[in-house]
Amino acid sequence: MSDGLRPAAPARGRLAYVTLVTNADFALGAKALVRSLQTTRTEAEVCVLHTGGVPGDSLAPLADLGARLVETDLLPTSDAFNAAHARDRIHGLAPFTRGEKPAFHTPLDNFCKLRLWQLDYERVVFLDADTLVLQNIDRLFHYPEFCAAPNVYESLADFHRMNSGVFTARPDPATYDRMLARLDAPGAFWRRTDQTFLQDFFPGWHGLPVFDNMLQYVWFNLPELWSWPDIRVLHFQYEKPWQDHAKADRLRPLIELWRAYERGEDIPDPATLPGPRA
């Protein structure tokens, strides 16, 4: 295992779903994610990268579910880079105008996602901790690096930009080293943190169907695109389903689905759920 990573156990195979947990809130999200993956009967390992900011009692449920825990250091970035990507500065220069990021959102921590290229797997599928996997997606392990879905949640104009909540990758320390060199170049500023960086690093990224990363705002912005039988990954971008927030009533069916996975009880067949127009 590379420097900066401390696994709690050895890898159990060459394929893994990987997520990143940086605080107790995202650990709660990861609990529902891990359970959703297990519901699909995948044979791949589930690996949780976690920073030192996550309490042990928040990680325990993930270990109990069988996830492999790998503690990660923050990236060895310069003071100038850290200052440029501090929460107050980055949210001021790149404000979120369509939704609200929760108070526990820490932009600098997002870059720890790049640590997955140091992991001891041959192929991984990365999933943000605020996603649910509703159908088996093991086919993605056979897709090339780098595949991601477009950041579609408002209009067709969104197709030019990728969303880094779901993507395919091939761990390789050499790739990680090249990433770090480009990431922290003099004067570098990545407007949407890891998302902007990954699109720049992989300019020829392969597009996945939106159903492999269906953003929750599609529910009310593009209801004609929503199709429960086709959705494989549901992504709670912006506001999180475990929060009280202004859009909760509009997103209630999605939130109730997330809660069922988090509890591990009364999980419905998503394909049978009514659509947004019902």
Image (tube, rainbow, N blue to C red):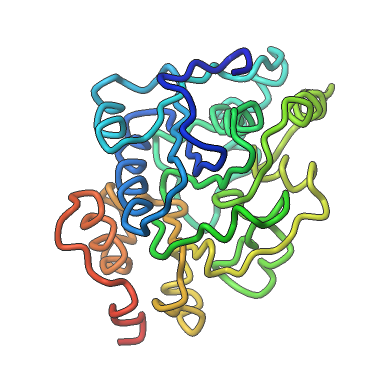
- Placement of 152 over or under 271, stated as above or below: above
The answer to which of 249 and 89 lies nearer the viewer is 249
- Placement of 12 over or under 271, stated as above or below: above
- Placement of 12 over or under 153, stated as above or below: above
Give the number of marks. Answer: 0
Instruction: Look at the image and tell me in which quarter the C terminus lies.
Output: bottom left
Give the percent coordinates (x, y) of residue 175.
77, 31
The answer to which of 122 and 177 lies nearer the viewer is 122
The answer to which of 114 and 120 lies nearer the viewer is 120
The answer to which of 47 and 262 lies nearer the viewer is 47
Q: Residue at x 51, y 41 (%)?
A: 16
Give the percent coordinates (x, y) of residue 10.
47, 23
Instruction: Look at the image and tell me in which quarter the N terminus lies.
Output: top right
Q: Residue at x 82, y 51 (%)?
A: 203
Instruction: Using residue 153 as the reference point, say whether residue 171 is left or right of it.
Output: right
- Placement of 235 over or under 31, stated as above or below: below
Q: Residue at x 36, y 23 (%)?
A: 54
Instruction: Using residue 277 as the reference point, say whether residue 181 is left or right of it.
Output: right
The picture quadrant where one finds residue 61 is top left
Instruction: Using residue 146 as the reference point, say whether residue 212 is left or right of it.
Output: left
Give the percent coordinates (x, y) of residue 81.
71, 21
The picture quadrant where one finds residue 58 is top left
Give the percent coordinates (x, y) of residue 154.
56, 70
Q: Residue at x 71, y 43 (%)?
A: 198
